[in-house]
Each structure stands twice: as structure tokens, then as C-alpha cells.
Image (cartoon, rainbow, N blue to C red):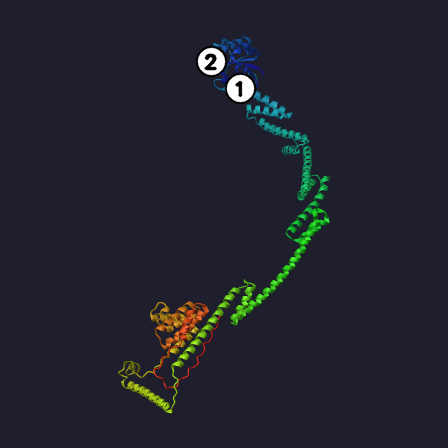
Amino acid sequence: MPLVFISHSSLDHERVEREIISPLRAHGVETWYSTDSIKSASEWERQISTGLKKSDWFLIALTPRSVTSEWVWREVHWAFLKRKDRIIPVMLETCEPDDLHLGLLPLQFIDFRNEVAAAQDRLLAIWGLDKATQVEIRYHAARQALAQEDWGAAIQHLESVLRLDPAHSQAEAELNHARQYEGLAALYDAGLTYLQEKRWHEALANLREVQGIDANYADILADSIALANAELQKEEAERLYREALGACDREEWAAAVEQFEAVLKLNPSHAEAQGALSRTVQQRELAELYTVGREHLQAERWREALKSFRRLRTIDKSYKGVADLIAEADAGLEEEEVRRSERERQEREEAERQQQLATLFDGGLQHLKNERWAEALSVFRQVQDADGNYKDVSAQIERAESLLRQEREWNELERRKQEARKEAEQRRAEAVPNVKLSTATDYIGSVVVRVFGLLFVLLLIAGAFYAGALFKESIPFLASKTQSPSGSSPVNTVPPEEPFVKFESARRQVDQEPRAWLANDVGKEIVASAIQNPLDSPNAEFLYLYGRANLLTGNTDEANKAFDAAIAKSNANPTPASVTIKKEAILALAAISMRTQKDRWKALNYYEELTRPSPTPMPSKPSKRKPTPTPTPTPTRKPKFGR
């Protein structure tokens, strides 16, 4: 390539470099340029002549600044003397070229003032470096490089072609092909290098990548891959073999077996691995038997431990003190048999004890059923002494004690009643004088007195009937009962029902259907007595019946209140009927107290009041009448307890 001397003003160096020097150098044209070739102005005089003499061409950059530059003027004059046929004027800016030299006027200058790219092409065309020529030259060089598989040079030439002509489709396709094969070549060369260095992993990776892109890339590609693969398997087998030996040293038999098997899979002819595998399998079995036996031994599963250790002994008698372990397991089994026998004996004794307790407990329940409270209490206490938590023995003891206490209290109550009766009889016997009629006259006189008294009573009754018949019209209440309405025939009236009979009938009705009685008669009493609560009734008989109905239906609290109210009403209005109701209410309260274990002393007080004899007044004068013998009191029936 030619060397071109660039004459310009230093004030224009940036534009000169950008628009002239860069495209020239890009196309291989060498330039001599003061900025590049001369370090300082002091060297100009010494080097300028050398630079001009080496140059084949002289290019002058015309600008208003360069035509006034003394250095440019000298260079132009030298060129017209030495390079007159190779002067290239380039018009960068409008100026007067003849200010430098008159010889510039007839020369055809290249105009860079408007279209710089076209001007650059014209400049390059001077040396045959225009775009079309360059494209053809470089594409031809690229084809030659592709034929020689010089991928780097081909890529460089094709890139130059595409820079000059981006629409060159053949250059673009061949550039991609060259780049691909440049990569393949690099991969293949690296793979071969790795093979030489015995770096099998890297070699196999590179060669397989080449094979994936182009399986026919090289004749020895498949052989190289096979070689790398075989060597890699051998290397891997050796690595696994070493690891397996290390696992054997650490007695990691399971891992060692797996590794030996992997070695033989990679290299079936590996003799050392074959022998080591059989030994390791046996050691693994021994270790498993030993481990399992030790676990059974620690868990005191003596039979299982003996089974493992005895099998271990058949394979290797001296393996880790297996004889001592078998002896230890035998001793543990013997001790376990002793404990089992003792446990079975204790279980039998406990079963017998439980049977005895069950028999005693059932006997206590039978005593309770037969109302033998003391015997039941004794039996239950025996059960409690033997086993305090046996079933509900504590509750049964409390029940028996309660029933026994109730029986004793009732007996005490009976005793006190008998004593009260005896004391009353004694007081009555002392109050009535034991007078004897000593003579018949006295006896006859008493008879006469009795006869006259009887006659007097009969006369009074007759007088009463006579007066009633005589004055019945003038007595209002007799007239209202006997006089019938005028003009009507006499009506047969039904005699009124006796109060006792009426009470007994009502009580039987309550006993038969207590709920029906509560549903019907309570509402009637509330309406009749104008009350809100049945307990506020003024009728002692209703209160008793109301309490009885509640007692029969299980409402003991309401029954208790009703009986208390009946007793209070009877005390407020003491009549023969109310006395009977009071007695019945007291007995009912006693029954409630026995059932609920509540208000016992209140019931006892009522009962003592009921059985307490009334004081008999002393006569002012001894009677001559023969005393009437006192009938023997009928003993009260002892109530049942418990149920």
C-alpha cells in the first residue's frame, strides 16, 4: 500500500483525522501525519525532509487556515518540485488555493464540503480502493480462507465485506458458517488437547459438544469420544474403588458394597473389586446381625438377641465377642423366666384376692338388701381394709352407716315412746283413786244415780224434739232445711257425706292418680280460695292432699312444705278432723326425712308432740266409780330403711 503525506493546518487536525486519515487507514493506506510522526515542533526541520521523501503521494487539506500556514506553504512547494504528478488537493472548506501555489488551480480537487462519504469514495478510488473494488477483493480473499479452513482470516475478510456492503447476503451466510466452524475447531482442538493431558471429563464434554453440532466434523471424532469415555470410566472406577476401600476401613459396609457394585458396573473385569465385593457383603451381613442383636439385647428381647448372635456365630465365631454376648442373652432370658414365673404367681394371688373381695362385696350388698345393716357395715369394712379403692366400697360403707344410724334413731324413738306411754299410764293410775265400794248400799246408790241420770238425758232429748216440732216454723235455720216451696211436693234429700269418708275418698283418689289430681284439683282450690300459690291455701285437708300428691310424684321439697303448712293450719284451727290431718302430715314428714336424710330432728319433734300424752286433771273428789282399765297401746310399726 502507498504512503501518503498529509499536509494540513494543526488547527484542522481533528477533522482531518476523522474524515481523511481514518478511512485511508481503514482501507490499508498508510499515512504520514505530523501528529503521529513528529513528537514536537523542534523536530520538524530535521524530519520533514525524511517524511516527504518517504511518501509516495502528497495530500493537501485546503482550508482558510492551511492556505495561510507557512509550514503548509513550504510542504506544497516541495511537492510541486518532487511529487508534481501525485498531488491530491482536498477542499475541506472554501478558500483560495492559489494563495499557496498557482499550480493548484488547474488540479481537480476532491470536495469534502457537502457529501463526505462520496468524497471519501473518490479519494479511495485513486488507489483502486473504492467500495465495489474493495468488496470484490475482500470477498475473494474470504473464499480462499474458507477453502483452506482458515476460519479466523475468513471471518475477518467477510466482516470487512459486510462493513463495505451490509446487504451482501452470501457474505453474511458464509460469515455465520465460518464462525460456527471456528467454534467447532476451537472445541475440537481443546478436546484433543484435553485427551493428551488425560483430562477425560473436559475432553469428553468438548468432543460431545462438537458431535452434537456436526457428527461428521472429523474422521476421528467418534474414536476420540470413545477413548475419552473409556478412560473416564476407568478413572471413575478407580475413584469408586478407592472410596469403597475407605468405607471398608471405616466399617461402612453398606456404602462399600454399593461402591464396589458401581466399580464392577463401570469395569466388569476389575478383579480386585470382585473379590472385595464378596468379602464386603459377608462383613455387611455380620455387621447387620451384630447391630440387630445388640438392639435386641439393649431392649431385653433375649430370644431375638440369641437368634441373631447364634447366626452370627455360625458365620464367624470370633466376631466382636459374640460368645460373651450369647452368654449375656442366656442369662437375661433365664432371669426373665424367673420374673415371669413370679409375675404369674402374683397375678394368680391377685385374682384370688379379687375373687375374695368380690364375694365379700356381694355379701355386703346382700346384707343391705336384707336390711342387716350392721352385718353389711362389717363386711364392707373388711373389703375397705383389704382394698380401699375397691369399686364404691366407701360409698357403701357410708350408706350402711347411715341406714344403721337411722335404725338406731328409730329404735331410740320407739323406746322413748314406750317410756312416755308408761309414764302416762302411771300418771293416770295415780290420778284415779282406787276407791272400793265397801257396802252394797253404796253400790245400789251409784246404780240409782246412773239410772236417774240416764232418764234426765232422755227427757232432755224428748224436750228438744218436742220444741223442734212445735217451733220449727219460727226457727230460721230449721225452717230453711225442712220447709219446702209452696205448691211443690216434698223432695227426698241425700244425707251429707261424713267428713272422714270424704277425706278418705279424696286420699284414695290422690294415691291412685296423683298427677291427675295435681292437674285438676289444684287449679280448683286456687280459684276457690283466690290464691296464687297452692301453699297459701287455708284448707289443711287440701294442703295435706297436695303434699301427698307431690310426695308420690317425687317432689319431696314441695311435699315437705305442704305438710308443714297443713300442720300449721291444723294447729291454728284444732278440730277432730284437723287433728287427724296433723297426725297424717307428721307421719308423712317422718317418711320424707327418712328418705332424704333431711330435717330429721324436726320430724322427731313433731312425732314426740304427737305421742306426748295430754295432762289429766286431778279430780276434786274421789269418784266411787270403778276405774276403767286402760287399753294396752298398739305398738307403732317399725319403718323400713334403705329402699
Q: Is residue 243 left or right of residue 578?
A: right
Q: Residues within 10 Å of mark 2 (few under 14, many from 20)?
A: some
- Where residue 403 sits in the image (x, y, percent)? 49, 69
- Where residue 624 sits in the image (x, y, percent)? 37, 86
- Tell me the SS state at disc 1: helix
- Where residue 160 sits in the image (x, y, percent)? 57, 23
> Furthest-left residue in view?
474
* N-terminal-most mark, 1 or 2: 1
Q: Nearer the viewer, residue 612 or 486?
A: 612
Residue bearing the label numbered 2: 65
Quadrant of the rendered image containing residue 335 = bottom right
- Examine the rendered structure and indicate whether residue 240 appears above or below residue 492: above
- Examine the rendered structure and indicate whether residue 56 appears above or below residue 452: above
Tell me which amino acid carries mark 1.
Ser
Q: Quadrant of the N terminus?
A: top right
Q: Nearer the viewer, residue 373 or 160?
A: 373
The residue located at (68%, 56%) in the rendering is 334
Q: Nearer the viewer, residue 307 or 378?
A: 378
Q: CA distance from mark 1 to mark 2?
A: 21 Å
Q: Is residue 348 left or right of residue 275?
A: left
Residue bearing the label numbered 1: 22
> Furthest-top residue in view?
81
- Examine the rendered structure and indicate whether residue 606 appears above or below residue 75: below
Q: Can the viewer see residue 516 in this picture? A: no
